[in-house]
């Protein structure tokens, strides 16, 4: 376990952005309990996308929460945010204490196993605060979170563990794409919470 081990001041990107690791901010018992509650208390639904004009419904499930019913458009579809519940507000406060940032929204993903992932993309939608902070909190199975530079194609891969917090900020979204890599070896689910700063 790496509880509180990471130096959160270290930038893990060699250039063109910032990634900070905070390690596992919850112990295993706490993280497992949060996973169970998130699985039960979040209004999950299958994600959707329009790719090359085709409407796709994914096995991966998502949920979108915010301070107000914000619209967020990605993958060519608009989503309207739900109001925070007490569990998400509790986790938001914890993340804000670590990152020294404030977040007004959270996009969540539920991956049932390693066959479900997210392809290469940048979180650069116009609704997001430019060069703002995005904090990714993981529960459940360890998954590989990969980054690839747009020009050099250099790759950096992190293994995000149960209860671990990672922050992206600065110019990261302008120069790097990221992905949750798939793996047939992973049979357990993962929940990720990406706390965001939306333009209001």
Image (cartoon, rainbow, N blue to C red):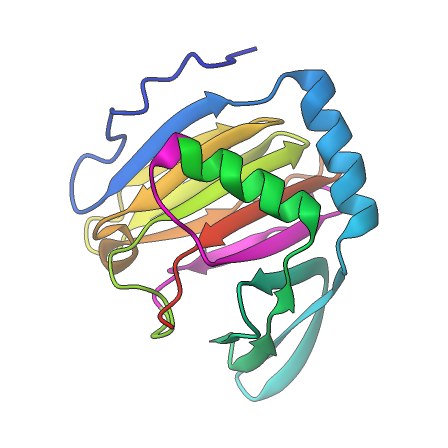
Quarter in which the N terminus is drawn: top right
2 or 97, which lies in front? Answer: 97
**Where, by quadrant of the figure, is residue 11 drawn?**
top left
Q: Quadrant of residue 7?
A: top left
- Give percent across and percent down for residue 200: 38, 73
Q: Does residue 103 lie above or below 82 as drawn? A: above
Q: Which residues are magenta?
A: 98-124
Residue at the extreme bottom: 53
Q: Is residue 176 above or below residue 9?
A: below
* Residue 151 position within the rendered picture, expressed as x and y whole percent measured from the top left: 19, 55
The one nearer the camera, 7 or 111, is: 7
Residue 39 lies within the magenta run: no
Considering only vertical position in the picture, is 153 above or below 140?
below
Q: Residue at x 51, y 49 (%)?
A: 194
Residue 61 shows up from this direction:
yes
Residue at 67 percent across and 76 percent down: it is: 56
* Residue furthest left in the image: 15
Left or right of 82 on screen, residue 19: left
Is residue 182 something that shows in the picture? no
Task: Looking at the picture, tell me which residue is in the foreground, 59 or 97.
Answer: 97
Is 136 drawn above or below residue 46 in the view shown?
above
Residue 108 forms part of the magenta stretch: yes
Q: How many marks?
A: 0
Look at 41% across and 25% down and name the residue there: 22
Residue 129 in picture, x, y percent from top left: 31, 64
Going by the picture, which residue comes out furthest to the right? 40
Q: Position of residue 96 (x, y in %)?
A: 43, 39
Q: Does 142 sit left or right of 189 as displayed?
A: left
């Amino acid at each position: 376990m790496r509880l509180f081990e990471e130096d959160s001041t270290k930038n893990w990107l060699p250039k063109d952005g910032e990634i900070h690791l905070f390690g596992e901010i919850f112990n295993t018992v706490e993280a497992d309990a949060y996973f169970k509650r998130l699985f039960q208390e979040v209004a999950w639904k299958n994600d959707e996308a329009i790719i090359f004009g085709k409407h796709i419904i994914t096995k991966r499930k998502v949920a979108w929460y915010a301070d107000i019913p914000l619209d967020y458009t990605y993958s060519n579809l608009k989503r309207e945010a739900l109001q925070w519940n007490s569990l998400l507000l509790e986790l938001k406060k914890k993340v804000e204490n670590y990152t020294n940032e404030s977040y007004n929204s959270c996009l969540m993903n539920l991956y049932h196993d390693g066959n479900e992932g997210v392809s290469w993309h940048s979180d650069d939608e116009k609704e997001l605060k430019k060069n703002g902070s995005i904090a990714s909190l993981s529960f459940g199975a360890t998954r590989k979170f990969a980054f690839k530079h747009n020009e050099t194609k250099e790759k950096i891969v992190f293994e995000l563990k149960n209860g671990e917090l990672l922050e992206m900020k600065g110019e990261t979204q302008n120069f790097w794409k990221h992905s949750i890599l798939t793996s047939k070896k992973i049979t357990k689910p993962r929940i990720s919470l990406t706390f965001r700063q939306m333009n209001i």
